Amino acid sequence: MKKYIGTRAFYKMVLLVAVPIMIQNGITNFVGMLDNIMVGQVGTNQMSGVAIINQMMLVFNISIFGAISGAGIFASQYYGCKDYEGVRNAFRYKMIICVLLTVSAVLLFLIKGDALISLYLHESNDVMANAETLKYAREYLWIMLLGLLPFAVEQVYSGTLRETSETILPMKAGIAAVLVNLVLNYLLIFGKFGLPVLGVNGAAIATVISRYVQAFIVIRWTHTHLGKADGNPEHFMAGVYRHFKVPGYLFSRITIKAAPLLLNEVLWSLGMAALMQAYSMRGLDVVAGMNISNTIMNVFNVVYMAMGNAIAIIIGQHLGAGKIEQAKEDSVKLMFFSVISCAAIAAVMVLFSGIFPQIYNTTDKVKKLAEGFICVAAVTMPLCAFVNASYFILRSGGKTGITFLFDSVFVWTVIIPVAFILSRFTDIQAVWMYFICQSIEIIKCIIGFILVKKGVWIQNITK
């Protein structure tokens, strides 16, 4: 068991990296859950409209994550070998790509927003419900577009801070933002203290304002603490805006590594949207039930998601510093720790599966569907934890081509065809359809285990 269990010092190191990320994401998702509950109190059609837009926003958010991840591999390894100019160039690369992505996303949503929303509305649903859902979704989307740029810029800063071992500040900024979001949601959704009752529009306004608050805190702190984060006067932000020129050779190398990651994240998030569209073939009640389930899942998923980020940072820094054997040993321990932690979390999810949906002002059918979806998510969570850990280990060494095949290609060639067939050519219930699609992850577990064990991910890309 020594191969799988680390020392007290090892877990202290892991938790110092992972816990701030867990806290930030946990509070963010918990407040997101409260937001969702507030919108759910307004009505089922409003909740469905917001759920559809959030699924579309997920594509943008994950695309930004993919855009900064490729350069993040370099930033982590450059920081490991104390090449601060390399970290600065990685930061500049992230900023350029994220601004271009944001502009493209805004144009797409403005031109094709209604068409994208309509993909989730089917003729089999109630016509009046479809019309109301489209109306609320459209209003929510237009306001949310104002928050895309601050979100993208904040992700560039926070991602680079984490890659340079500063995880506390992004956590503090995230906490401040979610508190602002929570208070404004209460005031604007329900019209408290003399403010107008804005419903879903109030939820969107609160989210946008909170994103500007979070971006302001992170940017201001970073530029007023140059050199203080790690005690080095040549901190990565020193002179980062003197120019936006990234050396040609480095731009090419990052792009070669980043392109599969960006494409992977875009295709993966589109794949999740396609899966939701397949589930929506069973009606708007399924969309509402899935929305409730996803909300509580996001709260519990922070454990293995934070562990994935910790794995990328720790293993990346080991590889950059040339500590190959330590990277190999720690990768096994980190995977084991992630799976065991999520098995415990899954048990808690099952306990809450029948209680949580009762909070919503919706039909008994929707509540029952949500309970089923939550149970399925809990049972398959350890599989997801193993897959997530494998993905970040492979990515830490720059094997982005492999992660592309491992992640999004698998979704589009295996999971989505299964969901398409089940939704169009069978009468199988939505919960069982979801269970089958989630269980397919076991194939990825086997593939991930083989790839990690072979050590195909071990390389120092900064040399």
Image (cartoon, rainbow, N blue to C red):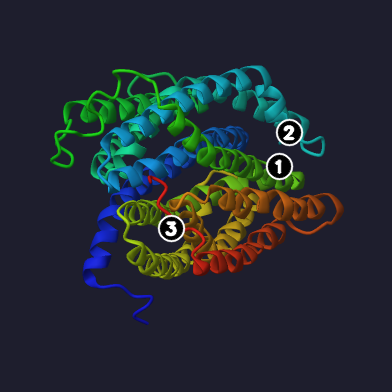
Per the rendering, the mark at residue 119 is 2
Quadrant of the rendered image containing residue 337: bottom left
Contact flag, marks 1 and 2 (Cβ < 8 Å):
yes
Q: For the residue marked with disc 2, what is the amino acid?
A: Leu
Question: Nearest the camera: 231 or 253?
Answer: 253
Nearer-N-terminus badge (1/2): 2
Quadrant of the rendered image containing residue 33: top left
Q: For the residue marked with disc 1, what is the amino acid?
A: Gln
Q: CA distance from mark 2 to mark 3?
A: 31 Å
Q: For the residue marked with disc 3, what is the amino acid?
A: Tyr
Residue 214: % across, % down: 32, 30
Per the rendering, the mark at residue 304 is 3
Question: Nearest the camera: 278 or 19?
Answer: 19
What residue sits right under mark 1 in the picture?
A: 277
Q: Secondary structure at mark 3?
A: helix
Residue at 53% of width from left, 19% of height from top? 103
Question: Nearest the camera: 394 or 445?
Answer: 394
Alpha-carbon neighbours of circle 1 within 10 Å: few (<14), some, or many (≥20)?
A: many
Would residue 36 be found to the left or right of residue 7 on screen?
A: right
Is 445 located above or below residue 280 in the figure?
Answer: below
Alpha-carbon neighbours of circle 2 within 10 Å: few (<14), some, or many (≥20)?
A: some
Residue at 72% of width from left, 29% of height from top? 118
Nearer-N-terminus badge (2/3): 2
Per the rendering, the mark at residue 319 is none
